[in-house]
Image (cartoon, grey):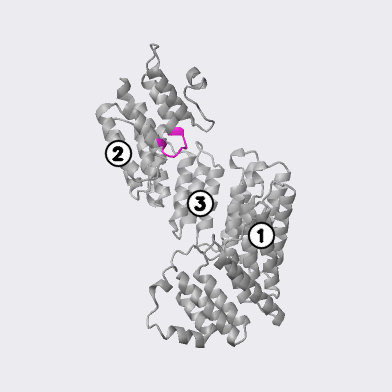
């Protein structure tokens, strides 16, 4: 340390701990003192790499372990386990193969404990290998052959591997196996709250018709058992299952029922089930996706309740941007005649949060886009004016330093769509056309946002709805179509709307092509837009 600090090996402030530790190791080798590294010396550094979030940590750890014999030190089980642990954070499939080779090497050179099996199982669990869950379970079954005893950890890793891959049947089967072993007196395999929550997660990803019903059964089982108690993670997993269900017409009311149960239990003194911002945001997301009458009102009521709870001292109940976004989306997707007014009211509230430095959320692009979506769906007049107002707010917030509010492809495309379906007098239609034209031109000139096929489709609709037949309309239609050809955005719907906007121009251009050139349509797929 003294040598490094004196400048012989300069350390910048951004040198990570594992690298500092390796520098000390080199010093030990170079020093004239009778100081030699031992296995524990290397293991400390390897563990440091294993816990590091630095890119390439596994590579560095593996390299260091391979250098141990150069110091006259043989790697032990702890050395190998630290390197394997570093590999659990790698996403490249090659590390699974490297880990498998190292696991076999360990069997030949060192004694292996259940820790090694668990780390290897974790590698399979967290890998992108679709067969990872089966491989993890295979190690579980092999533990007994090696005279090792599987535990809660062993089973939980396997259940988690199944949950990550949506294999709810195998996850449920492993949980039942744990319950059976526990009933027979094997306390080491007694399921934990993580076991149950992982099964609920697996059910949430399954998409099965009865997923919610089965998830509720799992939660009920936890509430019946004496050795495990429900917590926020379990209930959040159940709400997530309800949110993701596409076969439940009462989703929003059921999700709110779980939330109310959590609030009641928390008020009764159970701090483990305290709902947090994530809990509330999921319930409101469920409201946004629900077709239940009153879902938007329910979402806003929950949002206001969050702010009240926060004021009373519940710090986990801050109404962040995600919560506000869910409530605004609930109004945007509702068919309420008050949807536009309510979304603007929530946006106004969020902007005030920003001005007042409130702990509650301020509007990001998703919130503003949801407001524009509500305007687009509205049957009221003045759509273009309201959309322009929202767009100007977004640009002002972005220019003020809040980059999260910057207009996106969805922003401009939704505004163009809203303008296409604007009703009203001639002045309303002119304003709608001018705004749509401005948005479309902004996309064409942007170096950051590429217009998608839907933008061309909607702008042709704007031309059809708001320009009278004649030379100007034909010129616009031709210019837009040629731009779409150049950018490879001519989908079937774009072509259809082009023909409607200007039949004569379409016939003249398309008559030269029996088959559309590939370059006219080669950028339709994966053009980065998802409908709101």
Q: Is residue 522 left or right of residue 445?
A: left
Secondary structure state at the residue bearing disc 1: helix
Query: Residue 391 in the image: x percent, y percent?
Result: 66, 64
> For residue 448: magenta?
no
Tell which tag, 2 or 1, sits nearer the viewer. 1
Question: Based on the displayed image, in which of its 4 quarters is residue 512 positioned?
Answer: bottom left
Q: Is residue 95 left or right of residue 457?
A: left
Sequence order check, earlier mark of 1 and 3: 3
- Circles 2 and 1 in contact, beta carbons < 8 Å: no
Query: According to the image, label 1 marks what residue?
Result: 395
**Mark 2 to mark 1: distance in Å?**
52 Å
Query: Residue 144 in the image: x percent, y percent?
Result: 30, 34
Query: According to the image, label 2 marks what residue?
Result: 100
Q: Residue furthest left?
A: 108
Query: Residue 172 in the image: x percent, y percent?
Result: 41, 48
**Mark 1 to mark 3: distance in Å?**
45 Å
Q: Which residues are magenta?
A: 50-57
Residue 489 seen: no
Q: Is residue 356 above or below residue 292?
A: above
At 48% from the left and 51% from the top, the residue drawn is 215
> For residue 53: magenta?
yes
Sequence order check, earlier mark of 3 and 2: 2
Q: Main secondary structure of the magenta part?
A: loop
Question: Based on the displayed image, in which of its 4 quarters is residue 442 positioned?
Answer: bottom right
Secondary structure state at the residue bearing disc 3: helix
Are there few (<14), some (14-19), or many (20+) residues within 10 Å of tag 2? some
At 26% from the left and 34% from the top, the residue drawn is 104
Query: Residue 196 in the image: x percent, y percent?
Result: 47, 44
């Amino acid at each position: 340390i003294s040598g490094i600090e004196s400048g012989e090996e300069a350390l910048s402030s951004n040198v990570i701990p594992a690298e500092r530790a390796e520098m000390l190791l080199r010093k030990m080798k170079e020093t004239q003192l009778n100081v030699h590294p031992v296995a524990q010396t290397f293991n400390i550094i390897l563990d440091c790499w294993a816990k590091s979030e630095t890119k390439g940590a596994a590579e560095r750890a593996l390299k260091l372990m391979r250098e141990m014999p150069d110091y006259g030190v043989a790697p032990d089980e702890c050395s190998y386990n630290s390197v394997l642990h570093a590999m659990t954070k790698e996403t490249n499939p090659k590390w699974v193969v490297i880990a498998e080779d190292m696991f076999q090497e360990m069997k030949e050179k060192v004694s292996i404990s259940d820790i090694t099996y668990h780390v290897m199982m974790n590698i399979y669990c967290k890998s992108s290998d679709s067969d990872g869950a089966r491989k993890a379970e295979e190690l579980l079954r092999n533990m007994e052959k090696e005279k090792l005893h599987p535990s809660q950890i062993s089973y939980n890793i396997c259940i988690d591997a199944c949950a990550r891959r949506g294999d709810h049947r195998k996850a449920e089967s492993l949980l039942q196996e744990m319950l059976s072993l526990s009933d027979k007196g094997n306390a080491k395999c007694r399921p934990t709250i993580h076991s149950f929550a992982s099964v609920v997660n697996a059910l949430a990803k399954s998409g099965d018709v009865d997923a919610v019903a089965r998830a509720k059964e799992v939660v009920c089982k936890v509430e019946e058992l004496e050795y495990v108690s429900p917590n926020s993670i379990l209930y959040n997993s159940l709400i997530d299952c309800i949110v993701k269900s596409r076969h439940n017409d009462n989703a929003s009311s059921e999700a709110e029922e779980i939330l109310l149960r959590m609030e009641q239990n928390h008020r009764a003194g159970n701090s483990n089930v305290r709902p947090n911002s994530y809990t509330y945001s999921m319930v409101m997301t469920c409201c946004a996706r629900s077709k239940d009458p009153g879902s938007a009102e329910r979402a806003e009521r929950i949002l206001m309740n969050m702010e009240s709870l926060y004021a009373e001292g519940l710090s986990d109940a801050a109404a962040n941007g995600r919560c506000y976004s869910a409530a605004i989306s609930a109004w945007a997707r509702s068919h309420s005649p008050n949807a536009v007014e309510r979304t603007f009211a929530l946006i106004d509230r969020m902007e005030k949060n920003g001005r007042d430095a409130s702990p509650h959320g301020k509007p990001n692009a998703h919130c503003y886009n949801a407001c524009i979506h509500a305007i687009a769906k509205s049957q009221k007049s003045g759509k273009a004016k309201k959309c322009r107002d929202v767009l100007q707010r977004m640009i002002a917030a972005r220019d003020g330093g809040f980059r999260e509010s910057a207009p996106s492809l969805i922003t401009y495309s939704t505004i163009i769509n809203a303008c296409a379906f604007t009703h009203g007098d001639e002045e309303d239609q002119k304003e709608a056309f001018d705004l749509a034209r401005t948005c479309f031109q902004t996309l064409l000139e942007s170096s950051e946002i590429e217009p998608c096929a839907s933008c061309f489709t909607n702008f042709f609709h704007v031309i059809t709805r708001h320009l009278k037949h004649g030379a100007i309309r034909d010129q616009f239609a031709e210019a837009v179509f040629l731009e779409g050809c150049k950018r490879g955005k001519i989908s079937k719907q774009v072509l259809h709307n082009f023909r409607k906007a200007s039949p004569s121009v379409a016939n003249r251009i398309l008559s030269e092509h029996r088959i559309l050139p590939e370059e006219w349509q080669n950028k339709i797929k994966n053009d980065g837009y998802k409908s709101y």
